[in-house]
Amino acid sequence: MYNLVVDAGNTSIKMFLFENGEIAHSLKCCTVTELLPALESAVPIASIAKGIVSSVSIEQETIASVFRPFFPVMLFNTSLRFPISIKYGTPSTLGSDRVAAVVGAVKRYPKRNVLVIDSGTAITYDIVTAQGEYLGGNISPGLNTRFRALHNFTGKLPLLQLDNSMEGLFGKNTKEAIGLGVQNGILYEVESTVREFARHFEDLLVVFTGGDSFFFENRINFSNFAEPYLVAFGLNEILEFND
């Protein structure tokens, strides 16, 4: 039997089918109406035991109601039990993706001090200790958000996107100046943040997740892994922990 994990972000709705703690199938949709047909094309509905929904963009109950006629569905909220100790000052304002990513890090890398860096629309830094205590973190604009800001809040700068082939210290034209300014700037931010956390947390492991995770993985000279589906692993662990 499968567990269904639904993670609705700012740009798409991702579904993951877990079997024995590992991802067996992953699906991506743009609208709620696509969810059930996409799921039925992957596995028989009767093979799904339970599910969990986490959403930062769509009402969670709207998504859950699609699946409730077939199996029980849990909604993510901060009143659930978690396999970590949350020390955040305002847990009710804590994003579900941040909690789930930290839970996923504890599941995948137990008994380690882990800095989770989730790079998407925003880039978040979250620290969890080897004792399973989530202490908090930081939030700053993500890569594409920075590109859009330069375009939207200036008169003439073009809208660019991440370009993995672009390298160098400075640009020799406007396109390179923007690209290297944004990409190098965020690398400098991440590198300095990692160094500072490493000063305070012994034997620190850095785990990159989110849509831009692989941009950072080979550019940061530190003990790190890229795990793009860390949030999904965390949500599945939360589902099992509350079953």
Image (cartoon, helix red, strand yellow):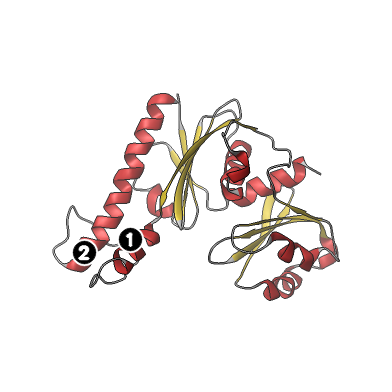
Mark 2 Cα within 10 Å, few/some/many (few <14, many 20+)?
some
Q: Quadrant of residue 57?
A: bottom right
Query: Residue under circle 2?
Result: 176
Which of the image's four quarters has the N terminus? bottom right
Q: How far across and how far down the image is residue 166, in percent?
A: 26, 61
| Residue type indicated by callout 1 | Asn
Q: How far across and how far down the image is residue 66, in percent?
A: 77, 68
Q: Residue at x 44, y 40 (%)?
A: 224
Asked if residue 107 is positioned above or below residue 183 in the image, the reply reads: above
Count all numbered tags in the image, as a single digit: 2
> Mark 2, mark 1: which one is toward the viewer?
2
Q: How far across and how far down the image is residue 142, in percent?
A: 40, 55
Q: Quadrant of residue 53?
A: bottom right
Asked if residue 9 is positioned above or below residue 202 in the image, the reply reads: below
Which badge, 2 or 1, comes first in the chain's sequence? 1
Dot 1 falls on a residue whose secondary structure is loop
Instruction: Answer yes or no: is residue 10 visible.
Output: yes
Asked if residue 32 is positioned above or below residue 96 in the image, the reply reads: below
Toward the left, the furthest residue is 172
Which of the image's four quarters has the C terminus? top right
Q: Are marks 2 and 1 in contact (CB under 8 Å)?
A: no
Query: Residue under circle 1?
Result: 164
Which of 124 and 218 lies nearest the eye of the viewer? 124
